[in-house]
Amino acid sequence: MLCCLSLAEFGRLDLLTEDDTQFFERHGYLRIPSVFTPDEVVELAAELDWLIEAWAGRSPGWSGDWRSVYMDPETEKQSKLVAMHDLYFYSDAWMRAVTHPHLTKAMSQLIGPNVEVHHSTMHVKPPETGHPFPMHQDWAFYQHENERYIDVLVHLDDTDADNGEIRFLDGSHKEGARPHITSNASGPCTPHLATDQYHLADTVAVPAKAGDAVCFSIHTIHGSYINQTQQNRRIVRIGYRDPDNRQTDGQSVGRPGLMVKGRRPRQAEQPLFSINGPHITR
Ligand SMILES: O=C(O)CCC(=O)C(=O)O
């Protein structure tokens, strides 16, 4: 069960040290070890495998000319990504995961007293040709006004160079949002940064263990290599924000999320959220 805290576990609630928060501010990313216990990982992994079978889409993944830089033609044809959004609409285990006290406490240490969940997204790299990710900021997918937005990669498998661990451009969050390429000669493509200016080879690898959470700023530039192993590489990204950090465009814009820490301050004249949608009330 994910919900009950023993006294020993309660002691873990002060999850991040001063050194951790300073590391995050300086580098723009942080690995938080063992946020989820081995039992919790087993449950979440089983639920994820069910979601993969029952709901997720299997597609060639992100589009763009970057694909021919990252992959030879044969690999490019075979490369696939298994993905879906908002896992907590489909699985109570994932609802408990995004509201997990250790995780939400850590988020409030980095974001502030009030924390709202924005989305969750499954990224599974299938065996051998599982999708690499070009260098990008997540800001390009869900634009927000300030930096009080953190993405968390919940690891369900150990990651390393062979299965495409997450990699960050150290300190790149400090310059804020950067323009991304959103179209190529053949038409619109998935947002990414120019392959001749931003190189995966310049990034810091952050291998992690199943149960770890690797968090990073919405402005931290990152990417990853292909999965060359025989197993799925299973990660779920969860986005958390300060509810006062207004979203201006992109994924799920205008949709309110659950408050997982603190309160949603009321802006002047702010109406209640509409019960008839759309929810663009801010
Ligand atoms: O799953 C990965 O390796 C990269 C994920 C990523 O780039 C993202 O979630 O923004």
Image (tube, helix red, strand yellow):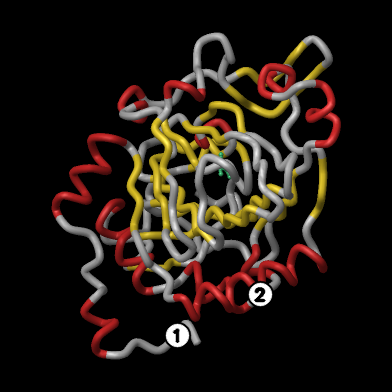
Number of numbered discs: 2
Q: Residue at x 50, y 31 (%)?
A: 137
Answer above or below: position of 34 versus 249.
below
Q: Nearer the viewer, residue 179 or 44?
A: 44
**Mark number, residue 3:** 1
Q: Residue 28 placed where, x, y %?
A: 33, 37
Nearest the eye: 243 or 10: 10
Q: Is residue 168 above or below residue 262?
A: above
Query: Residue 222 at x, y = what percent?
Result: 48, 32
The residue positioned 78% from the left and 58% from the top of the image is 56
| 112 lies left or right of 99 | left
Q: Is residue 122 left or right of residue 116?
A: right
Q: Is residue 110 left or right of residue 69?
A: left
Give neighbour class at mark 1: few <14, some 14-19, many 20+ (Cα, 10 Å). Answer: few
Instruction: Give the percent coordinates (x, y) of residue 230.
Output: 71, 52
Amino acid at dot 1: Cys
Disc marking residue 51: none
What percent of the width, then of the height, locates residue 279?
62, 55
Q: Amino acid at mark 2?
A: Ala
The answer to whether residue 269 of the structure is visible from this angle is: no
The tag earlier along the polypeptide, 1 or 2, is: 1
Q: Give the residue displayed 54% in from the left and 26% down from the top.
A: 135
Verify CB contact (< 8 Å) between mark 1 and mark 2: no
Residue 26 in sight here: yes
Judge by depth and name the residue closer to the eye, 94 or 176.
94
Mark 1, secondary structure of its residue: loop
Determine which residue is flagged by label 2. Answer: 46
Image quadrant of ligand 1 equals top right
Element marked by disc 2: helix
- Which corner quadrant of the image does residue 134 belong to? top right
